[in-house]
Image (cartoon, rainbow, N blue to C red):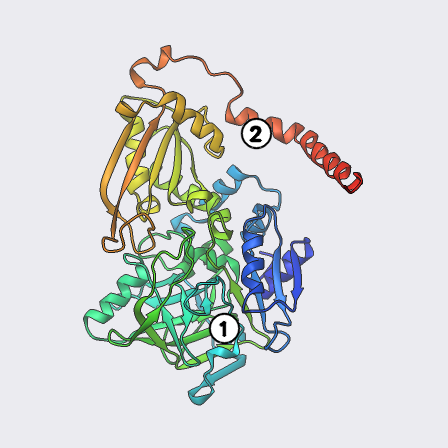
Amino acid sequence: MRYGDLRGWIAAAREIGEVRDVRGASWEEDIGRITEMLHHTDDSPAVLFDDIPGYPKGQRILVNANATRRRLALTFGLPLDTERRPLMDEFLRLTESDRALPPRVVPDGPVFENVLRGADVDVLKFPSPFWHPLDGGRYIGTGVVDVLKDPDSDWVNLGTYRVMVQDSRRVGVYISPGKHGRQFRDAYFKRKQPCPIAVVVGVEPLLFIASTLEVPQGVSEYDWTGGIRGEPYEVVIDPITKLPIPAAAEIVLVGFLHHDRLAPEGPFGEWTGYYASGERAEPVLEVEAIYHRDDPIILGVPPNKPPYEPHRYREYLRSALLLRELKAAGVPGVTDAHCFGVGGCRLFNVVSIEQRYAGHARQAGHVAAMCRVGAYLGRIVVVVDDDIDVTDLNDVMWAILTRSDPERSLDIIHRAWSGPLDPAIHPDEKGHNSRLIIDATKPWEWRDRFPIAIGPDAATKRETRKKWGWILEKAVADAMREAAAAPAE
């Protein structure tokens, strides 16, 4: 790894020309607008905001960290030019269960450079932005890692659950139903016990990624991340909650959630591209202590209309995890999988197979829809033959339109796992949704008589672009030069 903490990551990304500095952008409006622009522009840089009006110089916000394959490779310690499938394969190798390493507890760390307790607690001292115009408040927790512990075991979960500023001493924490952190929280609440929580606002991008993915049941994201790094992740024990927190975190808020202490939370622009969950009463964290480094950095990853930053890296990582789960379930002949960013890497997933028997495509589709990676808030799963490029939306749609027939190719799963963020479900009926499985493979019974397709297969297309893609780049550059040289009308 070329970095040890968020500051080290920024320095490494700056060395390879991937960071831009922006000064003077307002937290009220500019930072949210700029971030939305970055999220929806291919190959846009990571941006570090400083000199934010109303706040001291050095209180910074980093956005768009993992939005390119090049920066994602940096985060995982891989060669910067690693291509899609090798990146996915290496990610799967790095996250094999036997690589997990428990964290190392150290006595102190930079996170304790400043300790605020009692009357000194002030969440408003940090420049939390209004990320979207209609948000119900300022969200300090977007690129956040929330640390909770199972009350019945030693399992420590790190999840990305949004955190809204209520006032100087309180924040609201929303956790979607079914998530590990929600299960832990509800177990405490059922017993009328306070739920300890640590909200880690600024953390290096690898641990943040871990908190956003489907890490195996019972495995802590600290262990998972340690396995990728090849060395234990360093943590310190918070004296108030007794939870392990990153020793080099930028900002941490600690305290307890209570079943009977609620406040309005939301609305918030979410990953589906809507203010989907409205305003509702959610548990409030009454912050007992704030720990932060000198000149702290907030990691900002606000949801936007898909695809936004996490969708750009999840297209690689969640696709790889889907491949792993299909194979672990015993589905043979799976050649590739892709979770499209336009569907938030959940709503539209595609699997390619080398057909081996009748019903093979249906099996792959149903497993993909209901395994851990595909189960939460999915919508459509498409199964295609192995000559289709699962990353090419045009190729996938061509397969749907020419190889599937509505009366024989569609299955629907009813009452699957959804949640409050699903915009297509009636506000009073959130919780379940349905799934569409599309079999866009050549019909098994007469596949040998199916018309022969023209054009190269996916592997050949990739090789052609690798060898001859410079032609396209030159054409684009020439067009830009000609446009710039054209006389103004």
Q: Residue furthest front?
A: 489
CA distance separating discs 1 and 2: 43 Å
Residue shown at 55%/69% (left/top)?
Answer: 27
Q: Is residue 368 above or below residue 457?
A: below
Where does the C terminus fall, quadrant-wise? Answer: top right
Q: Position of residue 201 (x, y in %)?
A: 48, 68
| 392 with respect to 446 (left or right) | right
Q: Mark 2 is on which residue type?
A: Arg
Q: How far from the left and from the top, in percent, is residue 68?
A: 57, 48
Quadrant for residue 408, please give it. top left
Which structural element holds mark 2? helix
User: Label 2, on which residue?
Assistant: 462
Q: Position of residue 283 (x, y in %)?
A: 31, 71
* Circle 1 residue: 251
Residue at 46 percent across and 51 percent down: it is 305
Hey, which residue is sitting farthest top in the picture? 449
Mark yes or no: residue 227 visible: yes
First of labels 1, 2 by sequence position: 1
Secondary structure under the numbered disc 1 in the rendered image: strand
